[in-house]
Image: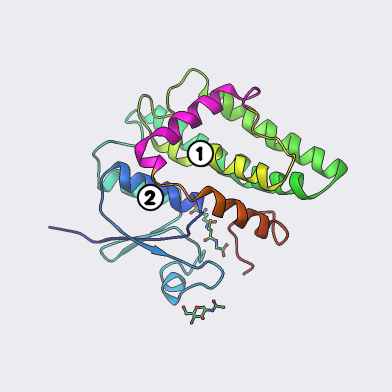
Amino acid sequence: MTTKVKLLGFWCSPFAFRVVWALKLKGVEFEYIEEDIFNKSTELLELNPVHKKVPVLVHDKRVIVESFVILEYIDETWPQDPLLPQDPYEKAMARFWAKFGDEKVTVKLLESAYKAMWSKGEEKQKAMKEAVESLEKIEEVLRGKNFMGGNSIGYLDLAIGWIGYWIPVWEEAGGSMRILDSQKFPAIAEWSTKFQKHPVIKENLPPRDRTLAYCHKRAEEIYANFCASEN
Ligand SMILES: N[C@@H](CCC(=O)N[C@@H](CS)C(=O)NCC(=O)O)C(=O)O
Ligand SMILES: *[C@@H]1O[C@H](CO)[C@@H](O)[C@H](O)[C@H]1NC(C)=O
């Protein structure tokens, strides 16, 4: 029996890429639908009336939203090449750090990265400090590890894998700003190089130039979330 899998995404959304990566790593065939998050389709509004955001996964008639929830659904539905650890404690830790990543790194870092890039003086210094402190925690978790998932890419790698690709783009968009200094964060640097070298990841990243141009354009309008629309 073939089941239909559909993904609504946005071309430079790190949240959507988590799902793309998971499906590709597991070899699940799916149809990708590009959503214009600044002019949302009625399909998106109907499928995700709560958040009105991508990614949205549709598996047969079932609709799943929120990237972490989708990752778990994928892992349980297609159990080959597991993403989450089997051990309950390890699983709890993976979920903990993924949540930390989104609360303290993704959101905080985006916010502070934008402040750091486009505000001046004290506010900029404070924002940079916050961003660096969050990354220090991630650095500790990564130290001595090949991947978060052991020797292969796992749930937590997919959860925070965006860091090594997107942050340098923001840094470049912001001019002289340096947050992800590879000397200060050698474990993150090494891990993100390995992560991006993986064939599935390498082939599924947004074009750098286009992402950079997008960051420049979005920078003046928003800083809290680089892929949040106004409404
Ligand atoms: N917590 C959500 C975040 C998803 C998210 O922020 N998606 C952005 C694209 S990167 C979006 O759809 N934004 C539309 C909006 O903010 O209206 C997840 O993990 O899936
Ligand atoms: C928004 O989307 C609709 C339908 O998809 C399209 O007809 C319209 O031209 C779009 N508007 C803008 C401003 O892109």
Q: Residue at x 51, y 54 (%)?
A: 12
The answer to whether residue 76 of the structure is visible from this angle is yes
Image spot of residue 182 (x, y percent): 62, 26
Give the side of residue 185 with respect to residue 162, left or right: right
Q: Are marks 2 and 1 in contact (CB under 8 Å)?
A: no
Q: Residue at x 61, y 28 (%)?
A: 137
x and y percentages locating residue 106 in the rendered image: 59, 44
Name the amino acid type tagged 1.
Ile
Quadrant assignment, res 2:
bottom left
| 229 relative to 117, above or below | below
Indicate which disc, 2 or 1, sits on the residue closer to the N terminus: 2
What amino acid is at disc 2?
A: Val
As drawn, 109 above or below 49: above
Which segment did they paint magenta?
182-202
Which residue does the numbered mark 1 point to in the structure image? 160
Quarter of the rendering occupied by the C terminus? bottom right
**Residue 93 lies in the magenta-colored region:** no
Give left or right: position of 79 versus 200.
left
> Does the magenta segment cover residue 200?
yes
Q: Is residue 52 left or right of residue 177?
A: left
Quadrant (top left, top right, bottom left, bottom right) of the N terminus: bottom left
Q: Nearer the viewer, mark 2 or mark 1?
A: 2
Q: Which mark is residue 20?
A: 2
* Residue at the image point whose x is 31% and y is 46% from the top: 24
Colour treatment of the image: rainbow
